[in-house]
Image (cartoon, rainbow, N blue to C red):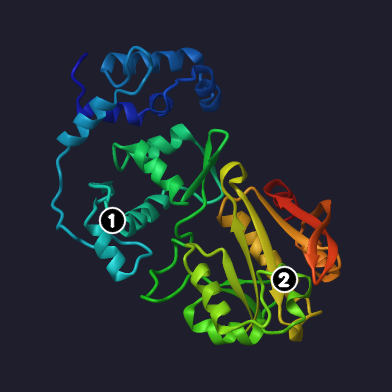
Amino acid sequence: MPHVTHLDMLRATLDPVRLAVLGDAAGGAIELDRIAERLEVDRREVADAIGQLRASGLIDEHGALATDVLRTLGRELPRGEHRAGQPIEGPWTPREADILGRFFEGDRLTKIPSSHAKRLLVLDKIAQMFEPGRRYPERDVNFKIQLIHPDYAAIRRYLVDEGFMDRADGAYWRTGGRFHTDMAAPEPGQEATVIPTSLTDVELRPYRWDMVDALVAAANDERIPRYMGDQFPHPYTTEAAEAWIEMAVKDHPPTQYAVFVRDTLAGGVGGFPMSGEATGHVEIGWWLNPVYWRQGITSAAVIALVDEFFRTRGYMRLWAPVMAPNVASAKVAEAAGLTLEGVARIAYLKHGVRYDQLNYAITRQDWKASR
């Protein structure tokens, strides 16, 4: 096999047809017709590109990417001066920027951290390479990761296992990490971005530990859990509020939000992402203190949550189970664009009475059409 130079690699990546062939080769299978159709070029031009890349040694006779050649080229690249521990720019606190600087040289990841907490931070930075809401074929994920580290398989697996990406049917999409990368880095202790609603005095805020007392005051009303699952207790104690906030603050970005009305905590909305064969599906729910009922506040909050989840998280389907007597919640679901998919008969036992469960849901396709 001929020796591959950095100039050979540069020539290959500067040609869009050869670059497309390399992308397919990274995924393990070159699809000549698909490349020709996508780039609107003749099949012969793609075939010529394949031949040139084989002759240069960048792909082998089976059409697979010559990863050993790429690793050799990477090791031979000149390294610019870089001070160990130099902070990395981005939406990070000063401490996070210092930690990232220990593992990155420019855009290259020099080492996968063994510490779980540091590895999560590195994965958060890598997740920024993927656009929220977009589905990526596995070969595209591999190619993007290879730009920063040769062990793309391990990093891809970490991204999925740690909740930064989900996958199904050969496609990957981003579900974690920081989504508001165009904003200034938060100060230490500052939480994620507030979500506005269609009502000027109503917004969704990520839970914080200083909200415990306000959460107890808002949630401790016996009318709230009348048609809710028993996981919403009454009386609503400080211990219950602390347990809820402890769970809520672990997710980045948040999946649970407090509803604020004129700077007062008035309720909550949020979701519980599923896994396994249900990956990409999220169960959502909501509640509101009775003082604020019948003002359109819950509907505005749920609409904002649905928009946030579909616009930035890459989820495919949201569903909301509603206890049949809860007519108000059924109306909220419909106002947010969810449709009644079916009824689970006598699915709830509440205060000794059996009630039907109304199953409302909305898919990404429904949401795009309705918004």
Q: Tell me where residue 299 appears, x and y as whole percent.
A: 75, 70
The answer to whether residue 262 of the structure is visible from this angle is no
Identify whether 311 is placed above or below 14: below
The answer to whether residue 214 of the structure is visible from this angle is yes
Residue in front for this viewpoint, 11 or 129 = 129
Identify whether 359 is placed above or below 245: above
In this figure, which residue is indicated by the disc labeled 2? 300
Residue appearing at x 31%, y 62% in the figure: 89
Q: Tell me where residue 163 appears, x and y as whole percent.
A: 47, 51
Quadrant for the N terminus in the image: top left
Secondary structure under tag 1 reads loop
**What numbered label is drawn on residue 225?**
none
Identify whether 178 is placed above or below 166: below
Q: Quadrant of residue 196?
A: bottom right
Residue appearing at x 38%, y 26% in the figure: 22
Residue appearing at x 53%, y 82% in the figure: 211
Label 1 packing within 10 angstroms: few (<14), some (14-19), many (20+): few
Identify whether 328 is placed above or below 345: below
Residue in front for this viewpoint, 258 or 354 = 354
Secondary structure under tag 2 reads helix
Residue in front for this viewpoint, 250 or 292 = 250
Label 2 packing within 10 angstroms: few (<14), some (14-19), many (20+): some
Q: CA distance from mark 1 to mark 2?
A: 41 Å
Residue in front for this viewpoint, 16 or 174 = 174
Image-based side of 293 in relation to 144, left or right: right
Which mark is in front, 1 or 2? 1
In this figure, which residue is indicated by the disc labeled 1? 115
Asked if disc 1 and disc 2 are in contact, CB closer than 8 Å, the reply is no
Type of residue at label 1? Ser
Image-based side of 119 in relation to 304, left or right: left
